[in-house]
């Protein structure tokens, strides 16, 4: 068996004014891509051939030329390296390309055109991906993450490959059932560590066993894109078409019945309310998520509103991670550690939700370990602010370790995330979600949708639906 591996994974907010360009997308090829799949030696013997995969920090729409260049390289390698028994597409599902609707639909259709109908295609998705009929028409298998915050990325990739190899070895052509469930949910309302998503996702193994299925996926979808495919869904794969249909309908009904229960998985309020609540809590540190400017959801990362409010409340012993501002970082490197400097912070990339914020700061530390993304740590009236040259989401302990920072030593940490990532969450005694300004407004009812498919909950709250 010969199996090609590749794909593109960029989570794109269509409401962001900052495009994702080719230079923003990391392209992995050959051995570098092969290293992303450490489970391959444990799979049944086959020739697994990594071609190219593009990935980027979640952001704004991908420029059409960037998408076409990566897609064309993948298709060229498919043509040159064929024939193939199978293709594994390592995707995300929330790709938005300027001037194109349903980018993953275009990608999968293009792959199908190259490899033909006899080649089996398997795809893995983030559960925050949006699935379309066109995607389902062109892949034979699709499986998605089952955890949010995500703890099963490698497990999902392995499952997609094992399903593919199983079907190829046993000549299985699974029946696919795809049921869109009309829900627009921000990820922070569908954390699998909280209800009602937790018990819904816990049903997946029991439904697979009860209906003798190959796989079941429940997707939350990605709400910050203005496309008709933006919705939750259920997907079942099975050899028995009737059982696959029955299971999908049962799960879709269950999903829909829980719609009013999807609430933020952490205490939520305005920025000011969260700061006041953090001050009142005895256990420290308290983490506040600057959710409207959440970089991991596609936010830009330079809205300085939270810094403004922290100073207004007289907060000290606080870490703010962080603000992307290449110009401010350059000034800090010019003046050096220990210097006092006037800076105009943020509001340069996302001019819709913020304006530059004037501060007088002391430069505490400079870090050029990453030559393409230098960091500066400054002190602004007792608030330590991490400045970065490029959009940077602080999701791992190693990022803070590199800067010599221990977030646990502060009373308050404000971080440009939504829910806290698995390595960050244990640092917090309490975690609050601030409904701050930015492109990633967690209150999806406020977003200027024009193309989502109606009726959809919660935009059309009184609607009725059944699968």
Image: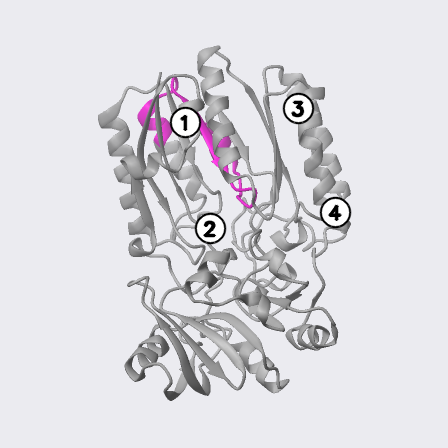
User: Measured from the top left, where is residue 106 in percent x and y?
Assistant: 39, 38
Q: CA distance from mark 3 to mark 4?
A: 21 Å
Callout 1: SS: helix
Residue assigned mark 3: 208
Residue assigned mark 2: 11
Callout 2: SS: loop
Q: Nearer the viewer, mark 1 or mark 4?
A: 1
Q: Nearer the viewer, mark 3 or mark 2?
A: 3
- Magenta residue span: 111-138
Q: Nearer the viewer, mark 2 or mark 4?
A: 4
- Classify mark 2: residues with Cα within 10 Å, few (<14), some (14-19) or many (20+): many
Residue lying at the far top of the rendered structure? 170
- Classify mark 3: residues with Cα within 10 Å, few (<14), some (14-19) or many (20+): some
Left or right of 129? Residue 104 is: left
Residue assigned mark 4: 195
Q: Nearer the viewer, mark 3 or mark 1?
A: 1
Left or right of 379? Residue 264 is: right
User: Measured from the top left, where is residue 270 in percent x and y?
Assistant: 67, 72
Q: Is residue 465 visible?
A: no
**Pointers 2 and 1 in contact (C-beta within 8 Å):** no
């Amino acid at each position: 068996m010969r199996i090609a591996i590749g794909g593109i994974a960029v989570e794109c907010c269509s409401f962001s004014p900052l495009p994702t360009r080719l230079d923003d997308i990391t392209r992995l090829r050959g051995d570098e891509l092969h290293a992303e799949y450490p489970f391959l030696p444990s799979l049944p013997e086959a020739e697994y051939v990594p071609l190219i995969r593009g990935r980027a920090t979640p952001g704004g729409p991908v420029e059409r030329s960037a998408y076409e260049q990566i897609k064309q390289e993948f298709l060229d390698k498919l043509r040159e390296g064929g024939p193939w028994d199978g293709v594994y597409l390592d995707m995300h599902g929330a790709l938005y390309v300027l001037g194109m609707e349903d980018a993953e639909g275009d990608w999968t259709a293009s792959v199908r055109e190259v490899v033909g109908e006899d080649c089996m295609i398997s795809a893995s998705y983030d559960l925050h991906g949006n699935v379309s009929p066109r995607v389902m028409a062109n892949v034979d298998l699709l499986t998605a993450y089952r955890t949010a915050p995500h703890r099963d990325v490698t497990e999902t990739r392995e499952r997609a490959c094992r399903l593919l190899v199983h079907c190829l070895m046993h000549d299985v052509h699974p029946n696919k059932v795809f049921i869109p469930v009309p829900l627009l949910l921000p990820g922070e309302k569908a954390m699998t560590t909280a209800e009602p998503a937790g018990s819904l996702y816990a049903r997946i193994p029991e439904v697979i066993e009860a209906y003798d299925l190959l796989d079941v996926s429940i997707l939350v979808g990605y709400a910050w894109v203005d496309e008709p495919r933006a919705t939750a869904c259920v997907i079942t794969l099975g050899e028995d078409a009737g059982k696959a249909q029955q299971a999908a309908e049962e799960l879709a009904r269950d999903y829909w019945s829980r719609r009013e229960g999807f609430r933020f998985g952490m205490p939520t309020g305005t920025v000011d309310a969260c700061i006041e609540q953090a001050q009142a809590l005895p256990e420290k540190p308290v983490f506040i998520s600057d959710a409207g400017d959440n970089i991991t959801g596609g936010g830009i990362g330079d809205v300085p509103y939270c810094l403004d409010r922290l100073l207004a409340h007289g907060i000290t012993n606080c870490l703010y991670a962080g603000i992307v501002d290449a110009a401010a970082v350059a000034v800090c490197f010019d003046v050096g550690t220990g210097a006092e400097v006037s800076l105009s912070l943020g509001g340069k990339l996302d001019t819709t939700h913020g304006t530059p914020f004037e501060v007088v700061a002391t430069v505490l530390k400079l870090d050029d370990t990453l030559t393409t993304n230098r960091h500066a740590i400054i002190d602004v009236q007792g608030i330590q602010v991490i400045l970065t040259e490029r959009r940077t989401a602080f999701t791992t302990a190693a990022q803070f370790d590199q800067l010599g920072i221990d977030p646990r030593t502060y009373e308050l940490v404000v971080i440009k995330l939504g829910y806290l990532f698995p390595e960050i969450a244990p640092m917090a005694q309490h975690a609050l979600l601030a409904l701050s300004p930015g492109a990633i407004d967690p209150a999806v009812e406020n977003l200027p949708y024009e193309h989502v498919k109606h009726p959809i909950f919660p935009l059309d709250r009184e609607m009725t639906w059944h699968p």
